Every structure is written in C-alpha cells, then in structure tokens.
Amino acid sequence: MGQSFEHLNDRLRRFIERQPVFFTATAPLAEDGTVNLSPKGLTGSLAVLDERTVAYLDFAGSTAETVAHLRENGRITLMWCAFEGPPSILRLHGSGEPVLRDDPRFPELLTHFPDIDPARHGLRAIIVVTADSVRTSCGFAVPLMEYQEDRPLHASRFEREDDSSLDAYFQRCEHVGTSLDGLPALPLPLPPTPSPAT
C-alpha cells in the first residue's frame, strides 16, 4: 500500500542511495508540448542534501529537455524503483532548478558529489529538486534485476572534451540550446568550468 510523507526520512534516504538508476519526468506548460522522461545513472551523481532537497549532476547529452522545462515552469517528478530486494517505488514530486556553471552556488553544490569525477562526463548543470510531496507505492510489478556495473561509455565519450570542444558539440546538437518545443534550454556558449569550492 502506498504512503505519503512530508519529507525524506532516514529510511527513504537510504532507499534512494541504494538505487543505481532513477527517472526524471518534466513537461512544458503547452498542452501539446513534449513530455520528457529520462533515466539517470552513474554512481555518485545524485545526492540527498536534506530532508526535502535532492540534487543530481546533469551531464552532456544530445538534448536538454529537463533544463528547458525547469527554466520554464520548475515542475519535476523523480522516481526510484527497487529492482533488487523488497518491492517498492518512491516518487518525489516537487520543483526543480538547473544551477548552471556560472551560478555562484555551483562550486559549493559540487562538493556534495565527492565520489564521481564530473570532468569525465561533460558536466553542464546541477539539478536541485525541492520536494512538495513524497509518495511510495508497492512496486509489485517491477521486475527483479541484478545490477552489474555502470557502463563506461559516457565517460569514454566525453572525458576527451574540454570546455571549448564541449561547447562546440552542444552548438551542433539541435536540441541542447533549444528544446524540442522551442523553449530556451542550456544557455550557450557554455560557461567555463568553475573553480572548485575551497
């Protein structure tokens, strides 16, 4: 049976931190706009900041729908499924914000991800999500699957890029600066990688 929570308690936090993959869902305000659903992985790329706030690293890709939708309206849902162990689904409904490389908060936020090298993945933003509601459901129909390891392909593709070549790649991608529906997405040219927080 599903339950509602006002915030992420310790049990829910541990559940989130155990899952190797999660999903993000966003949509534009337009009735005929494209609903976006994205899987996210890479160990160490998500952090629970407090009982109502999570953040994840937004890495290089050929589109930027989540960034575009959050810039327009801020609505987002995150979902985690238990593919191992007892069945459970957790959804966090809330508001999100893309914190871009030139935002003064960026270096400090990056300190919450000590177990991943963002330079290997073309980091372009940090998505910060504040929960309005947290809900669980049974997950009885979610299959049992065994996690093996993260795929090395994303790092091997983007670790050879510097700020200049990464910006050139984004400029060539049709839907990085502008979403599928024509909304402003990732601001280009790409701001340089900020200095680490001290």
Image (cartoon, rainbow, N blue to C red):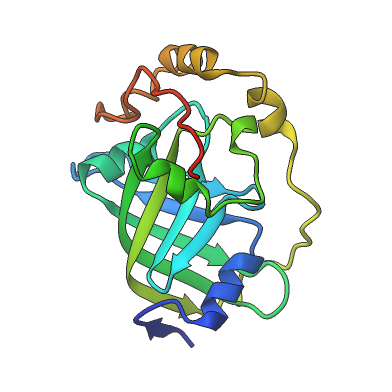
In-front residue for pair 129/138? 129
User: Please, is residue 170 above or below residue 108 in the view?
Assistant: above
Give me the residue at 44% from left, 23% from top.
Answer: 192
- Report x, y in % for residue 137: 49, 78
Quarter residue 159 falls in:
top right
User: Please, is residue 30 above or below residue 78 in the view?
Assistant: above
In-front residue for pair 50/147? 50
In this view, the residue farthest toward the front is 198
Give me the residue at 54% from left, 64% from top.
Answer: 80
- Report x, y in % for residue 185: 31, 30
Give the total number of marks visible in the rendering. Answer: 0
- Report x, y in % for residue 182: 25, 26
- Report x, y in % for residue 46: 54, 55
Quarter residue 174 falls in:
top left
Asked whether, in this view, residue 18 is left or right of residue 2, the answer is right
Give me the residue at 58% from left, 50% from top.
Answer: 45
Asked whether, in this view, residue 114 is left or right of residue 175, the answer is right
Give me the residue at 60% from left, 18% from top.
Answer: 161
User: Please, is residue 14 above or below residue 195 in the view?
Assistant: below
Quarter residue 52 falls in:
bottom left
User: Please, is residue 26 above or below residue 183 in the view?
Assistant: below
